[in-house]
Structures are given as C-alpha cells and as structure tokens.
Amino acid sequence: MIADTLRSAIVEGVLLPGMPLRQDAVARQFSVSAIPVREALRQLESEGWVRSETHKGATVSPLLADEAREIYEIRAALESLAIGLAIEHHTADTLDHAEACLRAALAEADEALYAKHNEAFHLSLYQPAGRPCLMELIDTLHRRGERYLRLKLGQASQKAQSDQEHQALLAAVRKLDRQAAQALVTEHLLSTGHLLHHLLSQKQAAETPARKKRRAEETPK
C-alpha cells in the first residue's frame, strides 16, 4: 500500500524527480514503523522509481532520456513477441474486449485514466498468448514507463496519433495478420521511445547551463 501510494504520487507529479523520501516522514504519514517504509522504498528502487545513495537516503529517480528510450526498446521486442504468439488464439470475445479497451482510451481526456486504458488495451492484445512470465515482464515495463508516457501525452497531437496507431494495430489483429501486427506494435513503441529521448535530451540541455550557474554560485570564493 505504501509503495502503491508513493508510486502514484510520482506518476502524477506530486513527488517530483530529485525530491527526498525520508523514512521518518513517510512513516509518520502512514502511521507505521520504519520497517514497512524501508521495504516499500526498496521495492520502488528495484522498479526504478526511487534512487538510494549512501549518506543521502532515497530520492525520486530523475526522468532520463536514455532510460525512456531503453524501456520502449525492450517493450517493442517483448510486445512484438507477445502479439505474434497471441494472434492466432484470439476469439470473438477477446477481440471485443480489446475493442472495448480501445474505445475507452479513445474517449478519455484525463491523462491518468488514459494511461490505464492504454495499458489495458495493449495487454488485451497479448493475453491470449498464455505466457504469464512474458506478461509479467510487459506489465512491469508498462508501470515503469507510465510517467514517461505522461510526458508524451503532454505534447499536442500525440494522443490522436497514438489512437490512430492503436486502431490500425487492432485491425491487423482482427485480420490475423501477424507480420503487420508485429511491425505496427514495434514501430509504435520505438517511435514513442525516440520522441521521449528527444524531448528529455532537449530538456536536459536547456537545464545544464542553469545547473552550472547554481554550482558556480554555491562554490566558496
């Protein structure tokens, strides 16, 4: 519960990159001892949400251009495999479920809810593969990449483009066109990774002079 609450606060921007997560403060917030807080922070660190450093404690992990690209590169490989395995096992019911997930995403304006519908749509395409270990890995990457997805959704026209790509993907699955479905999901995810890498690299480049100036001002004369 502690890990879930902190993870949601990070995704929603309540806890920003670099903010400290002091065990005593978190323990007071949840009215618990330090032990469950320590376990929650350890779990979040293993998922990439939190960074721990000696003598500094835990802080919210930064948004990194290379990490964003890598997450989507790995997702592209795993989800291409998953959709290839699943496609011949889809039924009228599973396709109707995927269609319902897609319609929910198309109609959603709230970024947080859209991210949930987006994940549900993707997973609905892979579930018939019957590969629980593969699904667990994909689910973990979806959760780790959610705050990066929010960055993409903050760009004008990106939701509309994603919606169009999702519609084309579902159409390929309905046609049992494995090659097209794999190509579409791969391009969809790799292009997202490329976009996020570009956006975060630009942001980092813009922030670097300001950081250097602050360090210079803080250096004792």
Image: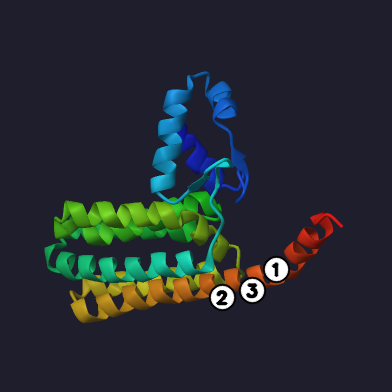
CA neighbours of label 1 inside 10 A, class few (<14), some (14 to 19), many (20+): few
Residue 51 in the image, given as x and y percentages of width and height: 50, 48
Give the residue displayed 16% in from the left and 56% down from the top: 131
Q: Which residue in the protein does label 3 denote? A: 202
- Whether pointer 3 and pointer 2 mark residues with C-beta atoms closer than 8 Å, the reply is yes
The reply, left or right, for residue 91 in relation to residue 72 is left
Residue 146, relative to residue 46: is it above or below?
Answer: below
Q: Quadrant of the N terminus?
A: top left
Q: Is residue 104 visible?
A: no
- Please, what is the three-letter code of the amino acid marked with disc 1? Thr
Which of these two is toward me, 36 or 84? 36
Residue 179 in the image, given as x and y percentages of width and height: 21, 81
**Sequence-first disc among 1 and 3:** 3
Residue 57 in the image, given as x and y percentages of width and height: 55, 39
Q: Which residue in the protein does label 2 denote? A: 198
- Please, what is the three-letter code of the amino acid marked with disc 2? His
Q: Can residue 34 be seen in this view?
A: yes
